[in-house]
Image (spheres, rainbow, N blue to C red):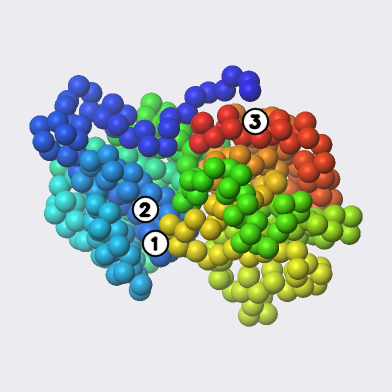
């Protein structure tokens, strides 16, 4: 693989990274564990990559000896998960109602109660309904204690939107921006200026952040997300056999795998059309859709899942599509199904980006990856080496790419080896 810029490991939140210099604050030093507060509107049982990432980060730091707390949304069904996560060595404060200015006191209360050494803010605008309150969290927290180190993890450039505010909140937002002048950006409040480090999950997002706060370049680091599923932990041949048994497939059957949310924009319509083109000449080919469903209602009062199911029937693919999900975070079944695959297909409508955690999921299972070209291809991706790129929403091109991967061993093996190298980064 060609030389590419190096990226930090996904769990690279060490004392130098967050800016402590030579101070001895590591867990186990002075018998005082570091206290980490993760601020995230997303947390299981919410169906979102950001929710799973918050859980996995919490576990990882707790296992490293940190005292971990999570501040998240008070939503129905969270109580059971809170008890479950507390048993793993960290505490969940599910007290936030809607992340508007009315929740400011709750944020301040938890910060004062936990007295964290580090606050990690998991941010993308839609998680907070594009309200700006949490974008000012760095300034609010620094007022409480200037010694607290703050890391903002930007999972997407999507920020706050003024049209989401009431007239009073809009006036207050403008007052804050006027009072803090160049330290406040329109979409990100003080997340960029007030944080000690800013993590971008993709190279292509950097420009959006720099345009809003140029000095962010001095503290910005790119960290692609890891695989956000429970890996099976079995020898590859055993896992492959187990996964195929789950699906009722023979060793000679061919299996394509899609993993991720079953939702609009994922290119699933394109994938189904490509599969329908291939089935007449590939009678032993099938597709596994591995992921939870986003039940957003579309036209005709049907959910997206219902629309997709209707399309599967219209294309005559009822016996060719296996649905795996929804599933619990620690279920190994999704990983076993991935291990059973011959190739992974992720045909996003807007192309592949580093923040897509399913890329890491695919590479962790050693699968050749077929995906779509974005407007800006990031440096870790090399067409023909660690993935095979096609134009978005082009079923004919996708069908051709699938045929090449399934029938040309040298292409398949090159992509497998490239995926192994890509996995070291993600």
Q: Residue 364: give x, y in percent of width and height.
A: 55, 41
Q: Tell me what residue is drawn at x 78 percent, y 35 percent.
A: 409
Q: Residues within 10 Å of mark 2 (few under 14, many from 20)?
A: many
Q: Is residue 9 visible?
A: yes
Q: Nearer the viewer, mark 3 or mark 2?
A: 3
Give the residue at x 16% y 34%.
28
Which residue does the image show at 33% across and 35% down from the upper left?
Answer: 13
Instruction: Look at mark 2 in the image and give the residue it sits on.
Output: 55
Q: Of the residues under marks 3 and 2, which one precedes in the sequence?
A: 2
- Secondary structure under tag 2 reads helix
What's the mark number on residue 44?
Answer: 1
- Name above or below for residue 304 compared with residue 239: below
Q: Image point 72% across, 52% down: which residue?
A: 251
Q: In terms of secondary structure, where does tag 1 sit?
A: loop
Name the residue tied to disc 3: 417
Q: Is residue 21 above or below residue 224?
A: above
């Amino acid at each position: 693989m060609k030389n590419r810029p190096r990226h930090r490991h996904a769990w690279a939140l060490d004392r130098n990274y967050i800016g402590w210099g030579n101070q001895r604050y590591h867990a186990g030093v002075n018998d005082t564990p570091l206290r980490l507060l993760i601020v995230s509107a997303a947390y299981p049982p919410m169906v979102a990559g950001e929710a799973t990432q918050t859980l996995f980060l919490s576990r990882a730091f707790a296992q490293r000896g940190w005292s971990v707390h999570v501040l998240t949304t008070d939503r129905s069904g969270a109580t059971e998960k809170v008890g479950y996560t507390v048993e793993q060595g960290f505490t969940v404060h599910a007290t936030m109602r809607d992340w508007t200015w009315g929740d400011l006191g709750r944020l301040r209360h938890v910060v004062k109660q936990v007295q964290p050494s580090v606050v990690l803010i998991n941010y993308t605008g839609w998680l907070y309904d594009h309200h700006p309150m949490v974008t000012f969290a760095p300034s609010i927290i620094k007022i409480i204690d200037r010694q607290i180190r703050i890391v903002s993890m930007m999972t997407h450039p999507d920020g706050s939107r003024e049209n989401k505010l009431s007239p009073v909140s809009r006036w207050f937002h403008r007052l804050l921006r006027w009072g803090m002048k160049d330290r406040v950006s329109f979409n990100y409040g003080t997340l960029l200026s007030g944080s000690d480090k800013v993590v971008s999950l993709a190279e292509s997002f950097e420009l959006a952040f720099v345009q809003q706060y140029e000095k962010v370049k001095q503290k910005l680091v790119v960290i692609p997300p890891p695989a956000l599923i429970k890996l099976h932990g079995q020898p590859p041949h055993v896992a492959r056999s187990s996964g195929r048994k789950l699906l009722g497939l023979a060793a000679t059957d061919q299996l394509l795998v899609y993993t991720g949310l079953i939702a609009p924009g994922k290119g699933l319509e394109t994938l189904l059309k490509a599969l329908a083109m291939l089935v007449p000449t590939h009678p032993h080919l099938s597709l596994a859709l591995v992921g939870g469903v986003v039940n957003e209602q579309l036209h005709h009062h049907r959910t997206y899942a219902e629309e997709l199911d209707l399309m599967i029937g219209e294309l005559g693919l009822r016996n060719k599509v296996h649905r795996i999900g929804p599933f619990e975070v620690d279920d190994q079944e999704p990983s076993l199904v991935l291990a059973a695959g011959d190739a992974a297909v992720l045909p996003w409508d807007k192309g592949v980006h580093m923040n897509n955690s399913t890329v890491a999921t695919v590479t962790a299972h050693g699968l050749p990856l077929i995906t779509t070209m974005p407007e800006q291809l990031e440096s870790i991706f090399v067409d023909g080496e660690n993935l095979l790129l096609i134009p978005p929403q082009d079923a004919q091109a996708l069908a051709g790419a699938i045929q090449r991967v399934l029938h040309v061993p040298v292409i398949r093996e090159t992509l497998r080896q490239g995926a192994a190298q890509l996995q070291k980064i993600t």
